[in-house]
Structure formats: C-alpha cells, structure tokens
C-alpha cells in the first residue's frame, strides 16, 4: 500500500466558507483520518495549497493550521505539476475566469456553488471542463446532511407512499451591523458583487429537489430585500440592494409541489437552520439541521460526517477512475 500525495489548490480559502467548511472540516479532516483509500489499496493524501489576495491573512491561516504552502500567485500554483486539484471558493463573480485557468492547466476542478452568476457563463465553464476531459464537480453538500440522508432512506423504502408535497424552511438572522457585527461578508448583499440569497441558496435547493424528489417543471419566486441598509466590515453604511429573502413554489414533473422559504433577515424557525417536511399518502416526516453554538464554531446537532468532508472525499476518490467516468 502506497501513500499518494496530491496537491489541492484552495483559492479563496481566507473566506468564511473556504476556511471553515473546505479547509478545516474537509481537507484537514481527511488528512487527520489518514487520507482517502483507493480500490487498489493506496491512500490519497491531500496537501493543501492556500491561495488568496491578502498575504497577511494567508500567513496567519497557514500558521494557525500548520499548512506549509501558501501563495498570492494563482498562476504559480497552477504551474506546479504536483498540484492536481483546483478548488474555487471565491465570490461568484470571480469564479469563471479563475476556474477556466485551472481547466486550461489540466487540473481537476471542484467549485463552490453557484458556478457562475448567469447561465451562459455556467454552461461555458461546464463545457470547457468536459472538452478538456478533466474531472469536475460542484459543491452539493446538503445531500449529505444526516436528516436528508434519512429522508432519502424513507423515500426509497416507501414510507411516504406517493409524495404529494414538500416544504422547506431555511434561515437565520444576519445582523445588519448597526448594533453588533454582521455574521456574513458585505458582498453577500450587493448585486454588483453577485450577492443575494437566490443566487447563493437556490443552487442548493435545486439539487436537493432534483436528487430527492424529482425534476422541476416550473417555478414561481418572489425575492425581497427586507433590510436595504447595512454596515460593512469597515463600519460604513451601504445600500444592500441584493435580495435577503426569497419565497418560491416549485411544480415537479411528477406532480409534487415544493415550497421553499429562505431568509437572511428573519429566523424562519426558532432553533433550526433548515427544516424539510415531506408529506405523502401514507405518512409525513420532518428533517432538520439545528444550530448549536459552542467552542467558537457551529456544529451539526445530528451525528454524521461533515457534508463538505463527504464531498471532498468523493472528489479525491474520483481522481482514480477511468476517463469515461470523469464527470461528477
């Protein structure tokens, strides 16, 4: 059995999601568990390469997590043949050009969602990866939440009978920054920087609905900006012109009706970040993801692997498959 080291470029890793979910809870967690086993008995060991624009933040992050490699030069990281995987956690409006660079360099690519701010750019990115023959994937971590895995089991074993309706409620209060600091970066609330809850969260709801309940036939959505004024990281008041709440109804090809409400300015549920209720002709069930604060971070109250860890593990395993299977 051999250990195979694979350099993984993490671009945008100094951001909240890049650091917490993708570096700490995914790549570093996989390293701590001894890497990822392959079918032939080898183990793939990911070696993170931190990439970003701010050298001070990168240096601090590197020291805090004992990661030796970091750089502000993406081209330099892409030119290194040891680095086989490119992961992108940048703001959505920066994702396409940087990921295209990685595809042109022959790297396997894995992106945060959404892959682009519009359909044309998303298709361009997907087609470029397919034409180049590189392994590629997009974050679909919600499918690995323990609650949704349990719903999948109930669906597969016929618990619901014929499913007729699904209701999803997602949300938590994100402070406007006036009385206490906001928990999310200011770009999330600016249209010019690809902010907005529809662009951010509806990519999740799309693959959850597609994979658990059925293909979407049509939808109706009302997006709203309930808090049009917020305070940024420098303490300056700015116009928050991107949507911070959205209310959508989906009709599926199989006749199921789904309703998903999402908000960053009201708490839709008192204790849960996400609840999904499924109603069928033989039964109903609710799955939830509860927020529990402790030791300075968020934990999943339900037992199971971190969703991001599962997705990263899957991509690393995927590097060993045949060329015909190189699209996640």
Image (spheres, rainbow, N blue to C red):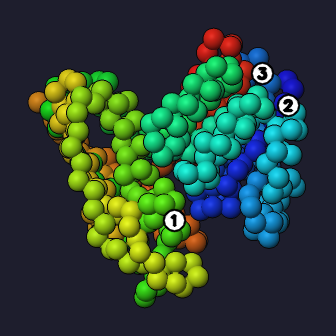
Q: CA distance from mark 3 to mark 2?
A: 9 Å
Residue of label 1: 187
Does 162 sit left or right of 65 as displayed?
A: left
Q: What is the x, y in percent for residue 39?
A: 71, 18
**Which mark is first along the chain, 2 or 1?**
2
Residue 42 lies, with reference to residue 9, above or below; the image says above
Q: Are marks 1 and 2 in contact (CB under 8 Å)?
A: no
- Nearest to N terminus: mark 1 or mark 3: 3
Seen as rendered, the residue at the extreme left is: 281
Q: Callout 1 environment at 10 Å: few (<14), some (14 to 19), or many (20+)? A: some
**Mark 2, secondary structure of its residue:** strand
Residue sitting at x 74%, y 58%: 52
In the figure, 23 relative to 291: above or below?
A: above
313 above or below 201? above
**Residue 204 in the figure: left or right of residue 163:** right
On the image, the x and y values in percent for residue 255 come to 16, 27
Secondary element under disc 1, as helix, strand or loop, is helix
Can you say which quadrant of the picture contains the N terminus?
Answer: top right
Question: What is the CA distance from the residue labelled 1 to the residue labelled 3?
Answer: 44 Å
**Alpha carbons under labels 1 and 2: distance apart:** 41 Å
Q: Residues within 10 Å of mark 3 (few under 14, many from 20)?
A: few
Q: Residue at x 79, y 48 (%)?
A: 74
Q: Percent position (x, y) of residue 206? A: 36, 38
Quadrant in the picture for residue 133: top right
Mark carried by residue 41: 3
Residue located beneath label 2 in the image: 3
Q: Is residue 295 left or right of residue 141?
A: right
**Crowdedness of circle 2 by 10 Å Cα count: few (<14), some, many (20+)?**
some
Residue furthest bottom as drawn: 179
């Amino acid at each position: 059995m051999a250990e195979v080291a694979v350099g993984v470029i993490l671009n945008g890793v100094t951001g909240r999601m890049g650091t917490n979910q993708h570096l700490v809870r995914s790549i570093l967690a996989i390293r701590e568990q001894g890497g990822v086993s392959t079918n032939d008995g080898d183990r793939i060991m990911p070696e993170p390469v931190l990439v970003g624009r701010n050298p001070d933040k990168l240096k601090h992050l590197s020291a805090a997590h004992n990661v030796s490699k970091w750089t502000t030069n993406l081209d330099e990281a892409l030119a290194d043949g040891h680095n086989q995987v490119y992961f992108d956690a940048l703001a959505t409006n920066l994702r396409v050009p940087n990921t295209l660079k990685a595809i042109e360099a022959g790297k396997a690519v894995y992106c945060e969602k959404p892959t682009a701010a519009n359909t044309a750019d998303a298709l361009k990115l997907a087609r470029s990866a397919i034409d180049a023959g590189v392994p590629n994937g997009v974050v679909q971590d919600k499918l690995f939440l323990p609650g949704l895995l349990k719903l999948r089991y109930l669906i597969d074993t016929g618990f619901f009978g014929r499913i007729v309706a699904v209701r999803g409620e997602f949300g938590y209060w994100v402070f406007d920054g006036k009385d206490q600091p906001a928990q999310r970066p200011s770009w999330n609330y600016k249209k010019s920087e690809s902010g907005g809850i529809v662009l951010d969260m509806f990519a999740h709801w799309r693959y959850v609905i597609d994979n658990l309940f059925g293909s979407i036939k049509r939808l109706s959505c009302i997006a709203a900006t309930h808090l049009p004024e917020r305070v940024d990281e420098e303490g300056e008041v700015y116009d928050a012109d991107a949507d911070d709440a959205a209310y959508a109804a989906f009709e599926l090809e199989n006749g199921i009706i789904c309703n998903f409400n999402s908000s960053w300015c009201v708490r839709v549920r008192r204790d849960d970040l996400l609840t999904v209720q499924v109603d069928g002709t033989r039964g109903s069930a609710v799955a939830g993801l509860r927020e529990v604060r402790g030791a300075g971070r968020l934990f999943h109250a339900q037992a199971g692997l971190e969703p991001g860890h599962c997705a990263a593990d899957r991509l690393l395993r995927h590097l060993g498959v045949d060329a015909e299977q190189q699209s996640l």
